[in-house]
Amino acid sequence: MAIKRKRLSINEYVEGILQGNTVVLSRAITIIESSLDTDQFLAEEVLKQVLPNTGVSKRMGITGVPGVGKSTFIEAMGMYLVENGHKLAVLAVDPSSQRSRGSILGDKTRMEQLSHHPNAYIRPSATGSSLGGVANKTRETMLLCEAAGYEIIFIETVGVGQSEVAVKGMVDFFLLLMLAGAGDELQGIKKGIMEMADAIAITKADQDNIKASKKAKVEYQNALHLFPPTNTGWTPQVLTCSAITNEGLEDIWKMIEDYYQHIGNELESIRKHQSINWMHETIGYLLKQNFYNAPQVAEKIADFERKVGMGQITPQAAARELMDLAKQKNGDS
Amino acid sequence: MAIKRKRLSINEYVEGILQGNTVVLSRAITIIESSLDTDQFLAEEVLKQVLPNTGVSKRMGITGVPGVGKSTFIEAMGMYLVENGHKLAVLAVDPSSQRSRGSILGDKTRMEQLSHHPNAYIRPSATGSSLGGVANKTRETMLLCEAAGYEIIFIETVGVGQSEVAVKGMVDFFLLLMLAGAGDELQGIKKGIMEMADAIAITKADQDNIKASKKAKVEYQNALHLFPPTNTGWTPQVLTCSAITNEGLEDIWKMIEDYYQHIGNELESIRKHQSINWMHETIGYLLKQNFYNAPQVAEKIADFERKVGMGQITPQAAARELMDLAKQKNGDS
């Protein structure tokens, strides 16, 4: 968007969103993503007013390393859902530092069919230098999509970093995509992500790959049985699917519906805790941002990192000295 | 320690520690654990001076849920090491909120033989209400033990919370203890801990339990092969052991030596990164502590949590309002 459009009024945003007007929705997301103070005020007011209409969707995180067929899976799964009458929004958490990795949902061309379907809304991901900021924007965008009537939200991440932890904190269900033949493909997946998954879907289970996929399914199933169940008592499932034959897509959706059945009324309390945690995480993120952006800290931080790295000072002493530095200068000014 | 002893001079602490005097070491750890400002200054000076003599030990995290036989394992493994001429210090990370869970190394009676051996030093864990504070104290205690000549450090955690993440950030090798017959015992292990492990030791592999332990070993080995290797390219191992027959203890120690062989010169850069991360973590912890302890925040926080939980305000907006609150009052005073 090279041309900067005039902003709408708060009421126009709110009404447009609640009517499911995607043009207004997109413009509202743009103000959420804006760093202008006036836009932030506007975004906060709009969110406040649509808030009673949020919380009604199924919130799903989808992750997997480049090459696993994430866009293809989302396209196929998404088409299955919208053709069955569901309204689906697809978002992505994508800190710009990882953008070069190449598997990100950067535009709509990767999901051609889905992006043209009236029941689907695909939003290229917010950009930003810090994960905390990007994740907050994604979470707020999700709320707007809910208010606009999308009852299923997919949030895509790349499976190589901390984004998954952030997304885990805003979704109900976390789906990990894997390939059979767990050799090199696995190297990209960060440790810890597998234990976050509520389910693993083995993609590309078609043609010559069917046998290997079935074998991988059994292996992952055995592995996951050794792991503790999730907090809700759900045992992670392993399924196979193909975006070519569409086999397995229906089973995956049925499993997700089973999951919501399983958690039942607990969903409300899970989300309540997620929201409260999110508040505290955001506070931590803002505190750090303010701290590290202070000139007297920014000036010295590399020096302290060097000293700590060389073992000339303990990490604790360095932290205390930097805290003092930040405080003193504030007091002086 | 009901009677408050007089403090030594900085020099007396430093010299005593470097000579391996355990009485002085214990008194120095006491000042590290103290919350008095004068003690904190003293502790920082002592640490600064012994710092060049730290970093020489093998730092190992050991975790497992209550019932897995953690104390028994540490006693048996520890005896094996000290009888082979090693000097071993055993510490624990134990936020007091979890103390009631009962499996913590609270005193030395759990490791009777080891605690009486001249080559072993066992320190009951620091207490405190926040994990960040306790973890910092444990890390500083570890440095003092290193300076006092203990070339192996065991840091014990309970496997039920966030302590393992903190300990992972201060050790070289993370050993998870498990039992065969992975039914109920597993329920206590938090998700994510298994993926942190550099090795799993299946305890109580003796008598009627040998067959089940061997089976469990194979199962976990298969499971761990599906996981990505650690950052250092190390593939987590699974071994069995018995504190009754002492079988497997030697193999476990050989594996740990293999691990150090494997990482070689990288150890220095791993620890450098750990230290720098630790500095940033400590800053985050201190920032949050200052923020939440500010009266104007402490007064309102429950109110904001309630509103966020009820969906009356977004977590982001709540965070921003609380940040403003903290700032304004600071400016006023």
Image: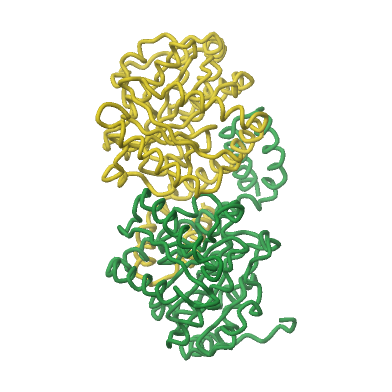
Chain colours: A yellow, B green
Q: Residue furthest right?
A: B2
Pinpoint residue A190: horizontal percent, then vertical percent: 37, 47
Of the 4 image quadrants, the one containing the N terminus of chain A is top left
Above or below, comparing residue A182 to residue B267 in the picture: above
Above or below, comparing residue B178 to residue A174 in the picture: below
- Total marks shown come to 0
Compare residues B132 and B231 and report the one nearer the observer. Answer: B231
Q: Does residue A249 appear in this view? A: yes
Residue at 34% across / 31% down in the picture? Answer: A203
Pinpoint residue A72: horizontal percent, then vertical percent: 32, 24
Residue at 46% across / 84% down in the picture? Answer: B87
Residue B72 sits in which quadrant? bottom right
Q: Does residue B46 appear in this view? A: no
Seen in the image, is B277 located left or right of residue B97?
Answer: left
Seen in the image, is B67 located left or right of residue A223?
Answer: right
Residue at 36% across / 15% down in the picture? Answer: A114
Compare residues A225 and B292 and report the one nearer the observer. Answer: A225
Residue at 53% across / 38% down in the picture? Answer: A169
Pinpoint residue A279: horizontal percent, then vertical percent: 58, 39
Pinpoint residue A121: horizontal percent, then vertical percent: 42, 16
